[in-house]
Image: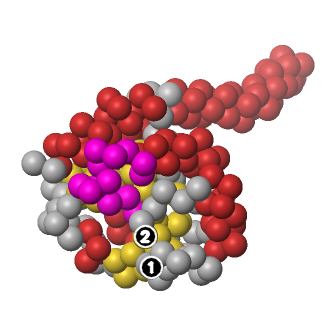
Amino acid sequence: MTSVATGETRRGSRCLLFLPIIAFAALAALFFIRLYAGDASLLPSALIGRPVPSFNLPPLEGMSSPGLSDADLRQGRVSVVNVFASWCVPCHAEHSVLMELARDPQLQDRVALFGLAYKDQPENTRRFLGQGGNPFARIGVDASGRTAIDFGVYGVPETYVIKSDGTIAYRFVGPLSQESLRQVLLPQIIAASH
């Protein structure tokens, strides 16, 4: 009788050994499914249609461009605010797209492109912009990340289209590509200018 009970106890103990592995595998599968469950650029933003939050960020040390404040986003033309960091790999991938946007002759007089340097060291930000060029008319340094939190930033990079009165019109989450620039961002910029 005791050998049967001992055998059942051993089988129960063996099952308990595999329980953490099974739980980990289930959790990993859930995270993997959620990671690819949808388009991150479609994340909702509670600030769409609302004024930009109040902020006043210092300029990037060693650069000639001034800092950035909410008043700069209410100057009578559409603004595009790109939240970036030198340590952000997708930010490097989208940088050429931002350079193209900054050089677009149809937008130069109607749209201002601003940068928000998120939790980055000034020397790293300068090096990043020195390598790929500086597409931004102004750069605000958000060393603490507070302004990004107030904007509702999910993760860098993110790009916001702001109407001329300082109202947030659109939010794009993730790196911009040539396709998303043409099919998504430019139509949003045009819509915000009307």
Instruction: Identify which amino acid the numbered label 1 is placed on.
Output: Pro
Q: Evaluate whether residue 148 shows in this view.
A: no
- Res 102 label: none
* 15 horizontally vs 95: left or right: right
Judging by the rendered image, the residue that carries numbered circle 1 is 66
Q: Earlier in the sequence, mark 2 or mark 1?
A: 1
From the top left corner, tell me how far across and down residue 33 is, in percent.
Answer: 52, 27
* 101 horizontally vs 112: left or right: right
Judging by the rendered image, the residue that carries numbered circle 2 is 138
User: Is 113 colored magenta in this rendering?
Assistant: yes
From the top left corner, tell me how far across and down residue 15 is, in percent.
Answer: 75, 25
Distance from the alpha carbon under mark 2 to that under mark 1: 6 Å
From the top left corner, tell me how far across and down residue 111 is, in percent.
Answer: 28, 55
Q: Residue at x 29, y 73 (%)?
A: 72
Taking depth in this image into account, of 166 and 78 the one nearest to the observer is 78
> Please, is residue 184 above or below residue 145 in the view?
above
Q: Which residues are magenta?
A: 102-114
User: Is 153 colored magenta in this rendering?
Assistant: no
Q: Residue at x 42, y 28 (%)?
A: 179
Q: Residue at x 45, y 62 (%)?
A: 136
Near mark 2 (Cα within 10 A), the count class, few <14, some 14-19 or many ≥20, is many
Query: Which SS class for mark 2?
Result: strand
Q: Quadrant of the N terminus?
A: top right
